[in-house]
Amino acid sequence: MHPDIRKTLVTTETLYVDGGKAATQPLIMIAAAAVIKNPWAGAGFVEDLAPKIREVAPVLGELLTSLIIKEAGSGERVQAFGKSAVVGMDGELEHASALIHTLHFGNHYRSAVQGKSYLAFNNTRGPANAPVLIPMMGKNDEGSREHYLTMQFSISDAPASDEILVALGAALGGRPHHRIGNRYLDLKELGHDAKNPAAV
């Protein structure tokens, strides 16, 4: 069954100058969002979210991935990625989490861009015009700090109280003038290896 989608949005941001210095390559970031009726709206406390997750998440993952790829030109062009969901004020934070924290959603995107990393994420609750923040990181390298980015936007009439806004983000490059090194250099300086779970 197709989820009850009210609208979609694709927005692109291009950064040409940062810190007063022109970028050698402009940074292009893309977001694709869908506003859907919360599948658990009006049902009270639902113990098992899995049936609706399996019904709705794959459709959203496929749809939003196709919108991102169309705007980017190809999956290969995507260097960093992330995901986000904002549930309306009558929903639970768990409802936002449910639709994006599942392989039924994210694997469509990861496969399309041939990514190896997990998708950076954000899940919040808010009213219409709430900020949508999509954190991103390198699709193949979680320690690639030049790809630590956030795409931000809002939709003036979404989410309504009984809706969820679900979004994917992509970056076609890194920060224009990245100069904070990478986490691997920090790990070496601190005497850790890349697998140390306590390292950030």
Image: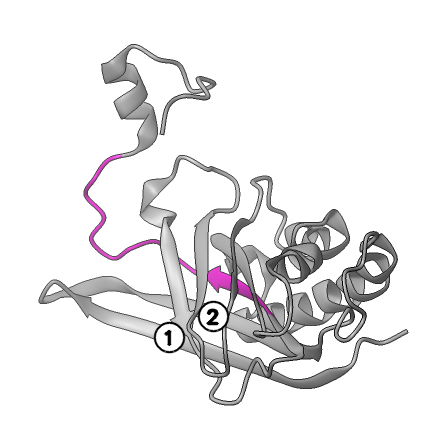
Lateral position of residue 10 relative to residue 23, left or right: right
Dot 2 amino acid type: Ile
Nearest the camera: 102 or 48?
48
Lateral position of residue 27 relative to residue 177, left or right: right
Nearest the camera: 109 or 52?
52
Across and down, in percent, residue 94 comes to: 65, 56
Dot 1 amino acid type: Glu
Which region shows up in magenta?
A: 166-181
Across and down, in percent, residue 151 comes to: 40, 65
| Residue 7 vertical position relative to residue 139 in the rendered view, above or below | below
As drawn, the residue found furthest toward the left would be 20
Q: Main secondary structure of the magenta part?
A: loop
Q: Identify the residue position indicated by label 1 in the image.
A: 13
Q: Residue, x 44% and y 55% (percent of image)?
A: 135
Quadrant location of the C terminus?
top left
Disc 1 residue crowd, few under 14, some 14–19, many 20+, Cα 10 Å? some
Q: Identify the residue position indicated by label 2 in the image.
A: 30
The Cα–Cα distance between marks 1 and 2, rounded to whole angstroms, is 6 Å
Q: Are marks 1 and 2 in contact (CB under 8 Å)?
A: yes
